[in-house]
Amino acid sequence: MRPKRPTLFGSSPGAGQPFINGRPCGVARRSGIRFANSTGGSGIGGPMNQSATSAASRTGEVHQPGQPFVGYRSGILHIESLPLHALAEQYGTPLFVYSKAAMLAALGAYQRGFAGRNAQICYAMKANSSLGVLQVFAEAGCGFDIVSGGELQRVLAAGGRAETIIFSGVGKTRSEMHAALAAGIGCFNVESEAELDVLAATAEAMRLQAPVSIRVNPNIDPKTHPYISTGLKGNKFGVAHEDALRIYRHAASLKALRIVGIDCHIGSQITDSTPYLEAMERVLDLVDAIEAAGIVLAHIDFGGGLGIDYNGDQPPAADALWQRLLARIDARGYDDKKLMIEPGRSLVGNAGVCVTEVLYLKPGEQKNFCIVDAAMNDLPRPAMYQAFHAIVPLREAQTQREKTAYDVVGPVCESGDWLGHDRQLAVAAGDLLAVLSAGAYCMSMASNYNTRGRAAEVLVDGAVAYLIRQREDAADQMRGERLIQR
Ligand code: LLP
């Protein structure tokens, strides 16, 4: 959809209130209303929600993650106080829209879990690295987990403080180390012995000491998609549990390094507490051994990985999970340690949607296709991991019409360019749909494949919409390219 003339966003009826399916459904909580889930979880889906057809879609019901910040009011899908169709009219489609309140609510669950503790929440910005999103977390007091020199520059540009940054990743270059040392980041999460030596040499040349933690691989199966399991022996991440003590001793012998902690990260979209609890015991065993060797660890960084609801998934709440983990830490006598975590998806995933317009319906003998203007370059997760994202109409009236099963696909010239298989939809060309749970690993993984400009992004705060990224055009994409000069 091409943007129309600017629309004014006043407050719509009931503005400022959470909502769900246009129906009052709950009792008062702080804001005066508490809302229950409309459809409940399908309980199926497994790792990455690969099931193309959810229980909800088979029954014609559509599961709606993101509530109460994304939901229907008077039959119109809103994000916070704003109707999504009005944002699409103003900014065009495909359009990513994020709820600031949803991000802060997700952060609040972690903050509650750590209340009264010495802890630092470092947002894993790879999940969504747009400046406006980083600004929300910087202003809320978060640190950042970065994995590149580019991410370092983004954090600093968004107002993040260098000393709250931790730098993860298996392939840090010398120049990235140099930039991070010059900026004064809080910690390098080192992933190999070879990296340790290069970091020490880089710091020495700058006459600085690099703060380090070593990422240990606890060899725990997080029971998630293989592409996002990171804590198993066969993964490229971290150092093996059995090598960790030796590598810590080596680090302690290097004068240009200052050991500050230990870290691990076992995977992503984890919906079960057990792998976390098991990994915690393994890491604490190492803390016992490392401190017995006379090396003091000021902090324990437990990574990120907590899953979100895509299709009825029921991950533990962040505060409940951390209550259990903190109890284990305390029971083992480490209540004095500073705790660090690196959540990404769980802070932003369900705060975002991608609004897309139906371009064409293409009925077929075997399948019906609903061709929309968003594609795998905007939303790569279905193509990459067979991931499930709920797809819902912007006007609930559409859900009451006769439904047909469609494969929702984009315009990219690949059969892998699909956003949803077998979705029950009542749609016509020109209708608008929202792809839900699109706040994490969508825009940050978007590409220009097929010379498609990346989508615009809007951040909503109550009844106010901020354009935080303008739509990319072809000139933006060709900037920096050169014709051959003869
Ligand atoms: N810390 C480290 C060292 C990581 O590698 C990651 C994610 C995180 C923290 C944050 O994990 P989270 O809380 O977001 O689960 N593109 C995939 C996910 C890749 C995750 C990579 N590492 C997806 O779309 O599902």
Image (spheres, rainbow, N blue to C red):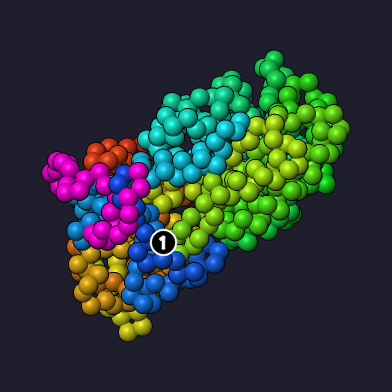
Residue 122, image x, y percentages: 54, 36
Which quadrant of the figure contains the N terminus? Answer: bottom left
Quarter-wise, where is residue 19 in the image?
bottom left
* Residue for point 62% across, 23% down: 181
Visible residue check, residue 153: yes
Q: Which residue is drawn at 37% across and 59% down?
A: 36
Q: Which amino acid does label 1 sit on?
A: His
Q: Is residue 477 magenta?
A: no
Toward the bottom, the furthest residue is 365
Q: Can residue 427 be seen in this view?
A: no
**Seen from this angle, which residue lies furthest front?**
28
Q: Residue at x 60, y 46 (%)?
A: 323
Give the magenta part as a residue range: 4-30
Q: Find residue 448 and report its horizontal and vertical position in percent.
A: 39, 49
Residue 18 counted in the magenta span: yes
> Is 175 situated left or right of 232 in this image?
left
User: In the depicted view, which residue is nearer to us: 221 or 178?
Assistant: 221
Dot 1: within a 10 Å radius of its alpha carbon, few (fewer than 14), some, or many (20 or more) residues? many
Q: Which of 22 and 410 is in front in this view?
A: 22
Residue appearing at x 26%, y 76% in the figure: 403
Q: Pinpoint residue 337: horizontal percent, then vertical percent.
A: 69, 32
**For residue 263, which quarter of the picture?**
top right
Q: Name the residue under label 1.
A: 389
| Residue 256 sits above or below residue 301 on the image | above
